[in-house]
Image (cartoon, grey):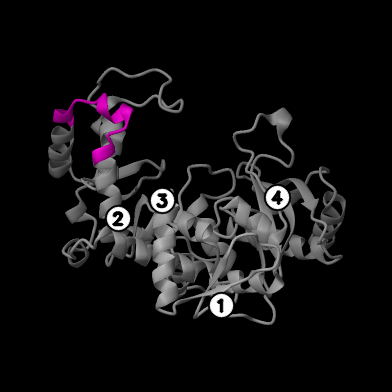
């Protein structure tokens, strides 16, 4: 199991040498490991897509990611690649079958929008340029608290459909984190748009191949989940091809009930020297069953859990030390007081005596990256007393 953990973490970029000042080349290398960056609107600490880069590269200029997603040459584009995620632009042709699926499926809420609105919105964006849903809202009657509680207008629903079907693309986001919709030809590089559409089997094969590189070692279920393939049978078919070609090697991982597959280029280091807090949306932990199988770490995000029923806190990040998840911390960036608030801190059974001191160092580094002055530890959780002592000692 320890070997599998080291293989998985090396594949995710935790073996790469750090750079004193990460560059675009560093970012591209890291993206080559993670494959995608999940996007989420929660901003209690830092937006989700920034955090996996920080966990692997250390403190970096977030403008690097803006340039990669909005500059030329555009390296990343937002699409439903895992869930909502930033993906390499060269994945766009591979997603066309997914786009066709959404076009044919026509979910109930999309059907409620008149089809002539689609053409009108595309024409409006063609004339106006990249625009948010709010800017394009026609004033159509709103639908109360439907659609997961959001008060979306018909224009917003139509834009969602056009984005999912590839008739619009996301050019970026504004300072309020609102999506900017634009025509694909003004977002996706022309040489990528011109590429032929692979067959569904070819697209799924490439996605499984990339998932296998990012995982290092994985089950078919893990590989299917990485890019959210619709059917397990399709993932298994792609795995069978890669096994036949020698790119994947069937292996047995101690404690795993399902067959596992090792990528032929996966590295097996003697040790992993990682020290990082991981976003709840980090690829290391986003598939919770895999996280439990690899790290013996039961993890559930509790953002949507009522306060009284939360076990560990609101925005809880696992703490990676070496090749183990040794603790978890509920963090908040209090920008008004310029403080990183540790609202709770818990140790795992595998935690070593060094855990509190190493976590204190990591939280100080994180606070500096977020431009916060202080780290403040609340007295909640079994790790909190030792952590507070380490934080206070470092400050003194």
Quarter of the N terminus within the rendering? bottom right
Which is more N-terminal, label 4 or label 1?
1
Circles 4 and 2 in contact, beta carbons < 8 Å: no
Per the image, label 3 sits on a secondary structure element best described as: loop
Image: 120 above or below 199: above
Dot 4 lies on which element? loop
Q: Residue, x 27% and y 26% (percent of image)?
A: 154
Say which quarter of the image contains residue 14.
bottom right
Spot occupied by residue 40 in the image (x, y as percentages of width and height):
48, 45
User: Residue drawn 37% across and 40% down?
Assistant: 178
Pointer 4 or 2: first along the chain: 2
Q: CA distance from mark 1 to mark 3?
A: 33 Å
Could you give the CA–CA distance between mark 2 and mark 1, rounded to whole angstroms? 29 Å
**Which one is earlier in the sequence, the residue at label 1 or at label 3?**
1
Residue annotated with mark 4: 298
Q: Estimate the spatial distance between the alpha carbons at disc 4 and disc 3, rounded to whole Å.
A: 26 Å
Q: Which residue is mark 2?
A: 95
- Residue 367 visible, this orientation: no
Q: Position of residue 151 (x, y in %)?
A: 39, 24
Mark 1: secondary structure: loop
Horizontal side, residue 253 vs residue 142: left or right: right
Kindly report which numbered mark, 4 or 3, lies closer to the viewer in this rendering.
3
| Dot label at residue 16 | 1
Q: Is residue 379 left or right of residue 199?
A: right
Q: Residue 203, percent across and down?
A: 31, 62
Marks 1 and 4 sit apart, C-alpha to C-alpha, by: 27 Å
Q: Are marks 4 and 3 in contact (CB under 8 Å)?
A: no
Magenta residues span 104-117
Q: Splitting the image into 4 quarters, where does residue 11 fall?
A: bottom right
In the picture, the disc for residue 231 is: 3
């Amino acid at each position: 199991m320890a070997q599998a953990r080291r293989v998985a973490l090396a594949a995710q970029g935790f073996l790469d040498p750090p750079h004193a000042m990460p560059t675009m080349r560093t970012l591209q290398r890291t993206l080559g490991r993670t494959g995608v960056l999940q996007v989420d609107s929660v901003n209690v600490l830092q937006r989700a897509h920034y955090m996996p880069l920080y966990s692997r590269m250390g403190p970096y200029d977030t403008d690097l990611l803006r340039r990669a997603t909005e500059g030329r040459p555009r390296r990343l584009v937002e699409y439903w690649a895992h869930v909502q995620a930033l993906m390499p632009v060269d994945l766009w042709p591979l997603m066309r079958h997914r786009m066709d699926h959404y076009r044919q499926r026509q979910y109930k809420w999309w059907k409620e929008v008149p089809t002539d609105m689609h053409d009108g919105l595309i024409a409006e964006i063609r004339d106006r340029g990249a625009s948010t849903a709010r800017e394009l809202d026609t004033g159509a009657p709103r639908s109360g608290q439907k659609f997961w509680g959001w008060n979306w207008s018909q224009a917003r629903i139509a834009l969602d459909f056009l984005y999912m079907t590839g008739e619009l693309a996301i050019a970026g986001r504004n300072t309020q984190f609102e999506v900017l919709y634009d025509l694909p030809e003004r977002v996706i590089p022309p040489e990528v748009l011109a590429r032929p559409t692979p067959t569904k089997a070819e697209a799924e094969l490439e996605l499984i191949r990339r998932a296998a590189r990012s995982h290092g070692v994985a089950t078919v279920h893990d590989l299917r989940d990485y890019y959210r393939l619709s059917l397990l049978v399709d993932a298994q078919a792609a795995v069978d091809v890669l096994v036949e070609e020698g790119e994947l090697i069937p292996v047995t991982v101690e404690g795993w009930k399902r067959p596992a597959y090792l990528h032929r280029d996966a590295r097996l280091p003697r040790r992993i020297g990682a020290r990082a807090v991981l976003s709840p949306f980090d690829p290391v932990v986003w598939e919770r069953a895999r996280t439990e199988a690899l790290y013996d770490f039961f993890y559930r995000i509790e953002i949507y859990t009522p306060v009284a029923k939360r076990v560990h806190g609101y925005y809880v990040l696992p703490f990676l030390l070496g090749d183990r998840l040794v603790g978890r911390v509920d963090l908040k960036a209090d920008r008004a007081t310029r403080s990183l608030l540790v609202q709770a801190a818990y140790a795992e059974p595998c935690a070593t005596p060094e855990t509190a001191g190493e976590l204190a160092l990591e939280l100080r580094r994180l606070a500096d990256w977020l431009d916060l002055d202080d780290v403040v530890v609340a007295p909640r959780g079994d790790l909190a007393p030792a952590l507070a002592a380490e934080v206070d000692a470092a400050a003194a």
